[in-house]
Image: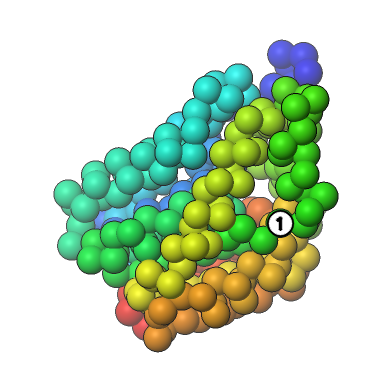
Amino acid sequence: MDQTSQPAFDAPEAQPFLFEGGPTGVLMLHGFTSTPQSVRRVAQSVHDLTGATVMGPLLAGHGTSADDLARTTHQDWVDSAEAAMRALQMRCQRIFIGGLSLGATIALNIAARQRDSIDGVFSINGSTGLYRPEVVAPLYDPAAPEFVSGIGSDIAKEGERELCYDRIPHVTLQQRFLLTNATGALLPLIRQRLLIMQSRTDHVVAPENATHIATRVSSDDIRLFWMRRSWHVATLDHDADAIASNVSRLSSGK
């Protein structure tokens, strides 16, 4: 890819954001290889609808280059999210955490391990370890290429584009596999209010993850919302407003 076609990772919308508001805090995490751009509009809508303080960090290895991503592990990505959550806790009395895709996976992971710190969690097309065999097998192939093609901009709505890497380091696919499966194992520890939003058509994450999450957690307050018009990056797709409304109801206690 030539320099003129590189994604604009220095664009304002790709940077971490903080929308200052009241004592309720909402942490919104972007997905694998992506940037806060993918969740910024929904986050702004949640802030506008509720007056909550909404934060969107940039996960380690993201928003720069795929080579930088190759030097990170799943622990680095989780650490980034937890650092942002601690910053939000210093500002807010109640914390809701969620995200898109891998961001949702990380949110579920943190919610399972820090149950006393989080009031609710939301997952937008989150992955919890449901993989087809033909996807897993190449992860252990010693002859696998160093990089594979990117998975970004899986969006049904015309004219929308996700700012993300166009290639993925093979080693980070292994890290993602570890994180998603570990999170799947942790699901029974989740007891908070839970909102699951899943696209019926998703070319990145198996839609069955939604029912897997719903049936594995220990929460007695679960809301499952199926999105029929959006693909994987639903926060930039036709259901973006519905996502914002659902997250707003969750964080407002409705």
Q: Quadrant of residue 130?
A: bottom right
In this rendering, position of residue 45 left or right of residue 115: right
**Mark count:** 1
Q: Quadrant of the N terminus?
A: top right
- Tell which residue pokes out farthest to the top in this image: 3
User: Would you call the spot at circle 1 few (<14 residues within 10 Å), some (14-19), or many (20 or more)?
Assistant: some
Identify the colour scheme used.
Answer: rainbow
Res 62 visible: yes
Q: Position of residue 242 (x, y in %)?
A: 57, 71
In this rendering, position of residue 236 left or right of residue 231: left
Secondary element at tag 1: loop
Q: Nearer the viewer, residue 197 or 157?
A: 197
The residue that disc 1 covers is: 131
Residue lying at 49% horizontally and 57% vertically, measured from the top left: 183
Residue lying at 38% horizontally and 38% vertically, measured from the top left: 80
Q: Quadrant of the C terminus?
A: bottom left
Relative height, residue 83 to residue 44 (above, below): above
Residue lying at 52% horizontally and 48% vertically, measured from the top left: 179
Q: Quadrant of residue 172?
A: top right
Q: Position of residue 39 (x, y in %)?
A: 53, 50
Residue lying at 50% horizontally and 54% vertically, measured from the top left: 182
Res 154 visible: no
Q: Position of residue 169 (x, y in %)?
A: 66, 28
Q: Position of residue 102 (x, y in %)?
A: 55, 50
Relative height, residue 176 to residue 96 (above, below): above
Relative height, residue 184 to residue 163 (above, below): below
Q: Looking at numbered disc 1 in the image, what kind of residue is underneath it?
A: Tyr
